[in-house]
Image (tube, grey):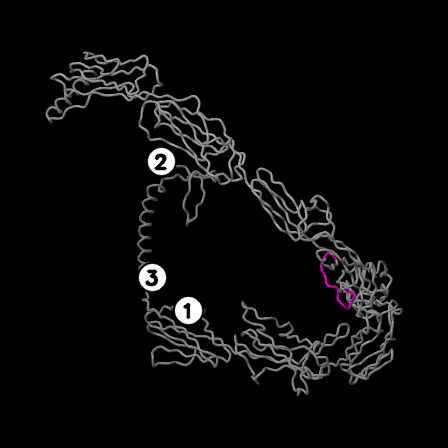
Amino acid sequence: MSGRISFVWLFVGVLLTATGVRASCPIELSPPSVVLRYGDSVSINCSTSATEFRGMGWEATKGGTGLKKVNHLTWTMEKVTDWEIAPQCFINPSQESQFTQCLMEPKIVLYKFPETISISTTGDLNGVIGENENFEITCGINDIAPVQNLSVRWYKGDTIVHTDTFNNPSKPPVNQSSVYNFKPSRKDNGVTFRCEAHMDLGPEGPQFNVSSKEYQITVNFGPDLECSAPELLEGDTLETLCSATGNPPPIVKWLKDGRQTNSTVPLKRDDKGNYTVQAEGFSYAEKDLQVNVVYGPELTCPSNYTASEYAPHNLTCFAVGYPTPEITWSKEDEEVDLPKILTRSDAGQYMITASNSRSSVIHTVEITVLYSPSQILELEDSEVSVGSTVGLKCSSMGNPRPKYSWTYFRVSNVIETNEDGVSRLLIRNATAYNMGSYTCHAWNDRGNVSKTARVTVKDATSECPVVMTPDRMVIHYEESTKIARCEPDSIASSNLRKAPYWEVPHGTRSESVTWSPDTQKDWDPRPACTGTFDGIGTCQKHLDFTLYKKPDSVSILLVGNASSVVEDREFKLQCNIANVAPARNLTVRWYLGNKTLKWYNEDQKWGIKSEDTMQVTDCFPVNNTDCNINVTRSPLHVSTTINVILNKTHNGAEIKCEAVLDLGVNGTNEMSSPINITVYYKPSINTTKLPDTIPLFRGYPEELVCEADGNPSPNIQWLDSPDDRVTGNTLMVTEAGFYNCSASNDIDSVSHVVRVVLEEDYLPLIAGFVAVAVVAISIIFLFIYSIYYKNTKMRRYNLKNAKLSTHNGNVAHNGWDMQFPMTKLS
């Protein structure tokens, strides 16, 4: 490693020599700088990394070493007292060195810092000074070095108010001072000052600071006179009016009209006048004042006062005091002005306040205003469910206090109470009888008022509490008359104001409890049983009355005078009902054959497509309601129409309409005569008997038959060329080609194209070929069989003594297999 480093240094030396550059001074000092207290010892080492040099040494006023051939050399002093000492380490090069003669000087800082510093002022003031006078204070630091590292901080209390620094380069100790100038105010009285000396010797040296003793000052000022508004409360003294401040504390005197007066005596309301206040201390001050004595108000006012509403009054209140009292009236914590004319809203307790800067007095007066009852409060419309409870409250303001009474439909579940000037009704287990008006009456000796509220019982039907016998009357035209009777129900009897009677707005008026209709003309009498009751007033219950008439006739027709309809096309049927009443109870039903005609079926393509409402026919209205089915109850001619779609399966079907008069228990129905419907439909060719493709054998004519269904019956034609038409459903063809069959009637026309394909007759040839094949096969079979028979069946047998026994073989006999006993010969 050392050889590598030597090589590097050699290379660098050669490079520097070749370029004519000399190396830097090869000296290192340790430490390069030192900070020493005056009289301390010091030791600094000087070393070099060079190998070629003549020698090195220290030059110093004390402790010099001379030139020595060493790599490091130490300069030491046991006690440094020379402020200007500046040792230098030098090195002398040899001929082989790459540097010139050079030296290095360590930085040596020698310091002294005092243990105490002093603070003083000019003159002999003992810290006493007048306000705003120039004040100079000095901080003395003796025998300190180096002074350029010194800073002085001035403190006023604990706050830094000034900092001094020094640029003196002198190294030996000096006596240094710092001066702080300021003008004190009275706020500075009693404050303390001090100075602090700080020595900052940098990172190599220590930090020093020392503080002086505190110096307190006294500031003389004043006197200053400060007086409040020249008004004193009765019983206060003059000395509380003004304050005199100063240092030293001033002496205060009071004079009235030029004569001295005792300022500690409490004042009375008659002691107001001109006063002079004098203050003598560090200087002199004087003020003239016009003093007033403040005392609280005294109020004169009655405690109770009664007045009539809208009448003038003479209620007044008086107050005395200084300053002049202000009188205010308040009611319910709000300031008010008492009007000259009192009303009921002005009644109540008033608070009269008389106040000034001294105090305030309060007096209460109760004003009573006599008036008639006010409008009733808190009585509002109410809603209650059946079986629930609801309360009504009635209250009115009046003087004297009002009394109460109620008007309503009285039933046992309503309880009435009066308490604390309020009247209440409590409705328990509410029923329909509790529906109606409830009127509360309030009165006193000056007048009366009333108010009405309505009670609604949910899920309950409000009915007039009368009973009609019968409650429903249905009579046929010109039938024997009947009698209806009207009377109050059992609960309503005690609340009745006027006996029930019949009112017939559209007929003969009857004040009787019975009513009989005229069955020839009372089509719409609207009879009502009328009664007048507490809480309900006048109410009515209408009799459900119907005078009806069966229709004179019911007929059906095909609209447009048509005699037939077309399949899948809408047509209109009309049902006419003559002279029927009441028409609003009329319903029309439609029948196809013996079954109800239903609404249109998309899949089956037939039925009722739409239906019109019932219309009045042959009507000439006198007013807007004469021809209104829903209003007119007298006999009317009415009709209704439907739009229908049928298909060919309904050709010749019967359609009827039925007029049904629905009257509840009573009712009637009338059926029309049927109408026969002829359904026309377009032709339809039977493609089962006439397929799309038909074969034709050469030499054999083919008959084409075209059959078609339709209404009217279709006309059939064959077209075998553009100009060749054949009438009729049969066509004989001998050639291949396309043949068009058309079927037409008044509804539409259709056509069907048949393709005739020519084919050869191969049957004889096939038959001959089959015959030859059969002959050939037969010959081959006989040949094979003959060979088989010769080799297997032909043997010699002995038939001697033949016995029928168990067979030993078979013998062919006329094609039958006969069993004979045989003996094989060979």
The answer to whether the residues at label 2 and label 3 have Cβ atoms under 8 Å apart is no
Residue drawn at 66 percent across, 75 percent down: 589
* Viewer-side residue, 188 vs 316: 188
Q: CA distance from mark 2 to mark 3?
A: 50 Å
Who comes first in sequence, dot 2 or dot 3? 3
Residue 477, magenta (yes or no): no
Who comes first in sequence, dot 2 or dot 1? 1
Q: CA distance from mark 3 to mark 1?
A: 30 Å
Q: How crowded is the residue under tag 1: few (<14 C-alpha within 10 Å), some, or many (20+)?
A: some
Q: Disc 2 marks which amino acid?
A: Ser
Q: Position of residue 559 (x, y in %)?
A: 58, 82
Q: How crowded is the residue under tag 2: few (<14 C-alpha within 10 Å), some, or many (20+)?
A: few
Q: Quadrant of residue 76?
A: top left
Which residue appears farthest toward the left when viewing the image?
Answer: 18
Q: Which residues are magenta?
A: 332-345
Residue under label 3:
767
Q: Quadrant of the C terminus?
A: top left
Q: Quadrant of the N terminus?
A: top left
Who comes first in sequence, dot 3 or dot 1? 1
Residue 503's place in the image compared with 279, above or below, is below
Q: Position of residue 418 (x, y in %)?
A: 86, 60
* Viewer-side residue, 173 vs 96: 173
Question: Which dot marks residue 691?
Answer: 1
Q: Position of residue 439 (x, y in %)?
A: 82, 68
Residue 337, magenta (yes or no): yes
Q: Disc 3 marks which amino acid?
A: Ala
Magenta stretch secondary structure, dominant: loop
Q: Quadrant of residue 576?
A: bottom right
The answer to whether the residues at label 3 and label 1 have Cβ atoms under 8 Å apart is no
* Viewer-side residue, 338 vs 810: 338
364 with respect to 606 (left or right): right
Q: Position of residue 746 (x, y in %)?
A: 48, 81
